[in-house]
Amino acid sequence: MLADARAARLGRAYGTLARGSAFLAASLRARAGTGQDGLPGASGAKVVGNGLRELDRFLSLLLDEAAGTVCSPGFDQRDFARQNNVANKIGTFYGLAGLDRPDVRRLRAIGRVRVCLHHCRGVVHDFALWDDLSTAAGDLPGRPRLDPPERLAVTFEDLARICEFYAQSGAGLIAVCGGTDPVP
């Protein structure tokens, strides 16, 4: 019975992440149809930053549920759930599961881009954010750089790829837990 309840919670957490990723990507695709290449100014940057923060939170909650399926009975679930840095948390999870830790550079880069969008409304104060955006979007560095303080040039395609990355990360966690993709 306990395993069934845990599997149900895991499925719900994954479904939330998958639906959140799909929703944000779909809303971004709708905006892309307006003819703009990037975010519509400071307010759009803050909204997208909030959306990415929610995806990060959904991934964190999925990690909490997944940890309960792969960790030993003495594992401190509450301490794990209090970890805020998702890149560190996913590394810890894979270590506890006895698997090679994934490369978390992309999650760290998404976090820095998200913070720039949310708190600075996309205004770049550090040259390293240009490479972070390339890493976050899953492509190679080499985007045109502007002199700070310019606005981070985030495209709708970049954001759609980040949304897809979150969905794939969730599916990977489900696979580690021995399940198949639940229908979100």
Image: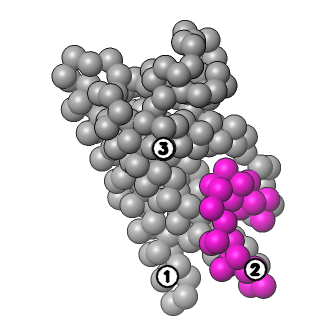
Q: What element carries label 2?
A: loop
Looking at the image, is mark 1 or mark 3 earlier in the sequence?
1
Indicate left or right for 65 with 94 as reference. left
Q: Which mark is residue 75?
A: 2
The label number, if any, that marks residue 4 in the structure image: 1
Instruction: Point out the residue furthest to the left here.
Output: 34
The residue at 57%/13% (across/down) is 147
Q: Residues within 10 Å of mark 3 (few under 14, many from 20)?
A: few
Q: Check contact, mark 2 vs mark 1: CB within 8 A.
A: no
Rendered location of residue 127, percent (x, y): 64, 21
- Residue in the picture at 68% in, 59% down: 89
Query: What amino acid is labelled 1 in the image?
Result: Asp
Which residue of the protein is positioned furthest toward the front in this rendering?
A: 149
The type of residue carrying mark 2 is Phe
Residue 118, above or below 183 = above
Q: Mark 3 points at which residue?
A: 119
Magenta-highlighted residues: 73-96
Where on the picture, by quarter, is residue 160?
top left
**What is the x, y in percent for residue 171?**
52, 51
Q: How far apart are marks 2 and 1 (CA)?
A: 20 Å
Nearer the observer: mark 1 or 3; the answer is 3
In the depicted structure, whether residue 52 falls above or below residue 131:
below
The reply to whether the C-beta atoms of the residues labelled 1 and 3 are less than 8 Å apart is: no
Is residue 153 found inside the magenta-colored segment of the image?
Answer: no
Q: Earlier in the sequence, mark 3 or mark 2?
A: 2
**Residue 110 in the image: x percent, y percent?**
56, 39
Q: What element carries label 3?
A: helix
Residue 85 part of the magenta segment: yes
Secondary-structure class at tag 1: helix
| Residue beneath the point at 19% across and 22% down | 34
